[in-house]
Amino acid sequence: MNDALYHDYANWILESSDLVDNLRDRNSIIIERFKHVLDVLTFLYNKKIEQKSLEREEENIFETGFYYVFDAFENIKLLLEHDYKGNIEELEHHAKTVILLLDTLDFQNELIGAVEEPNESHMQSLVDIEHEILSILEKKEDAPKELHEKLDHVTEGIYKELEMDYYPIGNIFFDIADELGLL
């Protein structure tokens, strides 16, 4: 694998450290969502620095995890800048709704990655939920319980129809962290 990815990761760490550290200092449930991914990335990055190479599977894990947190934190940064004018305390106040948005985006990405040509109505239902959540966040409000239930209902229906199982990336990285002895 090209070493550029590891340089990109190092740059991302530097660029995102204020946000990540701030969320950690607040014991944010937002950062908790990424804990195992970040732990695995740190472990593999340090191993790459020390040993100069990783096994192919480790490289794939690193690449997947890095792109995942990079995309997620880009979305968090956009919310923070656009809707919360940089006020991380206010963003944290709506952390459950931010996580609902991230979950919705994860489902969209999973559907795109799992199916050659995703069903347009499936994608549209997820995009509609995304827009609902964004509208709520723009008003600096919390998503109602019914919207959480709506996402659950829609995704369960999609996965049942497609005869797919959903195993969130956070759970996958929990298992990897366990295998690496990081828990």
Image (cartoon, grey):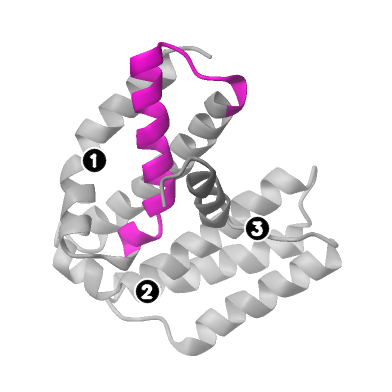
Residue 18, image x, y percentages:
15, 45
Circle 1/circle 3 CB separation < 8 Å: no
Residue span colored magenta = 30-57
Horizontal and vertical percent position of residue 10: 29, 26
Left or right, 22 with reference to 32: left
Viewer-nearest residue: 179 or 126: 179
Mark nearer the viewer, 1 or 3 = 3
- Marked residue nearer the N-terminal end (3 or 2): 2
**Residue drawn 49% across the image and 12% down it:** 2
Residue 61 belongs to the span the image colors magenta: no
Q: Name the spot of residue 60 as percent of width and height, x first.
A: 58, 28
User: Eyeballing the image, is 140 above or below 72?
Assistant: below
Which residue bears the numbered disc 1?
Answer: 16
Which residue shows up at 51% across the image and 63% down it?
103
Q: Which residue is mark 2?
A: 96
Residue type at mark 1: give it: Ser
Upstream in the sequence, badge 1 or badge 3? Answer: 1
Mark 1 or mark 2: which comes first in sequence? 1
User: Front-most of 84 and 90?
Assistant: 90
The amino acid type found where label 3 is placed reads Tyr
Q: Secondary structure at mark 2?
A: helix
* Residue 44 image position (x, y, % from top left): 42, 29
* Label 3 sits on residue: 167
Gap in angstroms between the C-alphas marked 1 and 3: 27 Å
Spatial separation of the CA atoms under disc 3 and disc 2: 20 Å
Q: Is residue 159 left or right of residue 17?
A: right
| Residue 50 magenta-highlighted | yes
Position above or below: 124 against 37:
below
